[in-house]
Image (cartoon, rainbow, N blue to C red):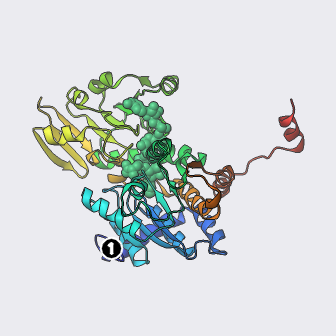
Amino acid sequence: MAPPKYKVKDIRLAKKGQASYEWARDHMEILDSTLGRLKRSMPLKGVTLGFCLHITKETAVLLIGAKELGARVAACSGNPLTTQDDVAAFLASRGIHIYAWAGQNPKEYDWCIDQVLSHGPSVITDDGADMNVKAHFDGRFSKMPILGSTEETTAGINRIRAMEKQGRLRYPVIAVNDADTKHMFDNRYGTGQSTIDGYLRSMNLLLASKRVVVAGYGWVGKGVAARCRGMGSRVMVTEVNPVRALEAHMEGYEVVPMSRAAPAGDIFITCTGMTGIIRKEHIDKMKDGAVMGNVGHFDVEIDTKYLLKKSRSVREIRPNLDECVLKNGRRVYLVGKGWLANLVAAEGHPPEVMAQSFSNQILAILHILNHHKKMENRLIPVPVEIDQSIARDALAAMGIRIDRLNAEQAKYGDSW
Ligand SMILES: NC(=O)c1ccc[n+]([C@@H]2O[C@H](COP(=O)([O-])OP(=O)(O)OC[C@H]3O[C@@H](n4cnc5c(N)ncnc54)[C@H](O)[C@@H]3O)[C@@H](O)[C@H]2O)c1
Ligand SMILES: N[C@@H](CCSC[C@H]1O[C@@H](n2cnc3c(=O)[nH]cnc32)[C@H](O)[C@@H]1O)C(=O)O
């Protein structure tokens, strides 16, 4: 059956979504100028693109931009809770085939991905790999011709890498997350700021003096820990990687196992991309009043099944904050039902940082269209030239000039 043109919560929200889109576009100068340069040759004319990304104002700038370069665009959200309904309505009003609304159940979430794949995209842009997994293993789509894909986030790359290892990848996937201009900025500064935003909007408590437990000291964990310290919190870090644990220790954080952090922490933020980080045995030890949430991977880092189903009572005490009364009588609080707190309880990353991520995305999509014949069915890095040119554009947009090696220095650098 042909997919409907679009499905959103309320198309009447389009005007509000447009204002939001304009605000983001005005602060995404490097994406805007990348798109502007490309417009002269309309490189996406006649191409169908499929996107599975958080539907926010920043994503709208990417999707409308792709359409303005000639593409037919179909999109859904890579998360059941993170769609900004006004932005989705605006996208529908602009001819994007969008299937997204906030608060989907698992069946609805799945249906939306199906609709995008039913458009027959040549390139898939994914965030977390749900669309790519479907395009590989769902019989309805597993033989569909797809030239390649681009992946936005660490967790998605981990899943694609596992597929590659087993020899199951049927087209190349560009690891957009692994570009320096993506993870060093989006994962660190983007998540650092938007996590504080999400926690504050949901709990609005003082961060100064609180003991904040950051699980995972990767790019996201580093950003979150640094921003919490900046707010005056005392930060504890949990890790499994000895190098990263050592780095956190040298940075001045208290490094402990979760079993020790659980009874000590006031606020918990999981950032690992792994499953089962905060479990029953940790939850049962938490202080009365502890607040926990996740900014890592789907809703699997905290055992929310235990928390929401086995508590004596659960009530939404504030928007995006559930109060759970445990069997031992203590109250613990869950932000955003354990899904990405920065996107569920706030608006995700600020536009300036998403401009870098999405410039990588649009250039990676073009790279696939131009080079797919020579690409192997593997996980492929973003070409260094793309990474460097985005960094230069970002500096230029901020009015920053840097030095260049002179001839003597270049010669010295090459000598031995
Ligand atoms: N919320 C957002 O907007 C946002 C933005 C970027 C990335 N992410 C997601 O955040 C997660 C982390 O991304 P990253 O780029 O920091 O990844 P990363 O690989 O750099 O870091 C993850 C860290 O978690 C550690 N870890 C793994 N298992 C652990 C455990 N049991 N206990 C403690 N630490 C453990 C790893 O050793 C690693 O250092 C991923 O799922 C990614 O997709 C979310
Ligand atoms: N889809 C999974 C995987 C984590 S999303 C993490 C990604 O979200 C991206 N992201 C963060 N904020 C925004 C935003 O405002 N708009 C679009 N994408 C965002 C960011 O680039 C990061 O790599 C899930 O929902 O759990």
Quadrant position of residue 136: bottom left
Q: Is 327 placed left or right of 266 in the picture?
A: left
Whole-percent x, y for residue 84 in the image:
35, 63
Q: Is the C-beta of the residue carrying label 1 under 8 Å from the nearest atom of ligand 2?
A: no
Q: Is residue 4 above or below residue 400?
A: below
Number of numbered discs on residues:
1
Q: Amino acid at mark 1?
A: Leu
Whole-percent x, y for residue 121 in the image:
47, 67
Q: Is residue 33 visible?
A: yes
Question: Which quarter is ligand 1 in?
Answer: top left
Other-residue count near label 1 (Cα within 10 Å), few / some / many at <14 / 14–19 / ≥20: some
Quadrant position of residue 355: bottom right
Whole-percent x, y for residue 399 in the image:
67, 55
**Residue situated in front as seen by the camera: 256 or 178:** 178
| Placement of the N terminus among the 4 image quadrants | bottom left
| Placement of the C terminus among the 4 image quadrants | top right
**Residue situated in front as seen by the camera: 10 or 205:** 10
At x 56%, y 43%, the residue is 184
**Residue situated in front as seen by the camera: 97 or 376:** 376
Q: Is 70 placed left or right of 271 in the picture?
A: right
Q: Is residue 323 above or below residue 136?
A: above
Which residue is label 1 attached to?
13
Whole-percent x, y for residue 9 in the image:
28, 70
At x 39%, y 33%, the residue is 214
Q: Is 315 placed left or right of 272 in the picture?
A: left
Q: Is residue 180 above or below residue 108?
A: above
Quadrant position of residue 196: top left
Instruction: Identify the secondary structure beneath mark 1.
Output: helix
Q: Is residue 217 visible?
A: no
At x 33%, y 26%, the residue is 258
